[in-house]
Image (tube, rainbow, N blue to C red):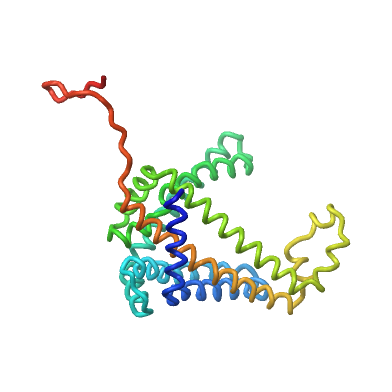
Amino acid sequence: MTMVLKELQEALRAVGQAPVLWIPGVVAGLLGAVLWILLNLAGTFFASRLVIISGLVMVLFVAGTFGLIRKNGTGAVTMVREGVHYYFRVLLPWLVILFVLLLVFVTITLVTILSTGGSTDYEAMGLLAVIVMIPTLFLTFFCDTASVFEDLQVFVSLRRSIGIVAGHAREVLGFFVVCCVLSFVDLFVFALIWEGLLYDKLEPLASYNETQFAAITPQQLVTLIGPDGMWVTAAVIFFGVAFIVPLLLAYKACFYRSLIGSPVAIQQVAGEFDSKGRWYKY
């Protein structure tokens, strides 16, 4: 746990000393705010396309951030150069993971339909998908940092991520806990700011009972806050995302850099080899 907190301090120091590391947060915040506005003005058709475009744009800045921290750089030119150089090495492993998860999801859907006689059991499908998805993402989470920090190809970076997570499972679990705490604090703080800015528009919700409050839909909430509230929400999304993204990216990079510098503990087992090279444990 000491390493987890130490690398968080290192990430805070990095974003404080290199203002260029805030650029990915600004870009992500702008994309998030535009996505929110487009979703409300044009619907899900155009918003879904923007999600894909946003992901492809952010890969450049993710790769650039990792490359910058790897080289201890502080310049925007270095970030862009590293982002371009490692763009596909960061993108391709995640495309492989996405493809595998989609394939598993399709398989789960077919098995569920066949086992239930043609009907779809969405609860069972969701449970099986989560059971598969969580370990997969946990083990392969550092494939992008492995690609940049160790200059690895697609499948090698996936294997490296699995190996490094398996060898440092406790530290990685602590890393995820800290990331969840940081994300929750960010969400909580900016949710309070959002509520304070829109207090007059949200005041009618105070008179709702539990049944009415549970029945309110996102579209009804958007209608309640009105056009002004939509723009205020976009601004809050921008600042919330712009603050948390650089910190999480820098934290991931610093944490992985520390992991690859830490030896994996190996349990010594007493025994010996015989004349034919066979191992016998005492």
Q: Residue at x 33, y 40 (%)?
A: 265
Q: Nearer the viewer, residue 58 or 266?
A: 266
Q: Nearer the viewer, residue 124 or 69?
A: 69
Q: Quadrant of residue 146?
A: bottom left
Q: Residue at x 38, y 67 (%)?
A: 63
Q: How many numbered marks, from 0 up?
A: 0
Q: What percent of the width, then of the height, locates residue 126?
A: 59, 44
Q: Nearer the viewer, residue 76 or 33?
A: 76
Side of 8 relative to 64 (left or right): right
- Against 237, is 89 above or below? above
Task: Say which quadrant the C terminus sits in.
Answer: top left
Q: What percent of the width, then of the height, locates residue 190?
A: 65, 67
Extreme residue toward the top, this view: 282
Q: Residue at x 66, y 62 (%)?
A: 188
- Against 276, is 239 above or below? below
Side of 56 relative to 203 (left or right): left
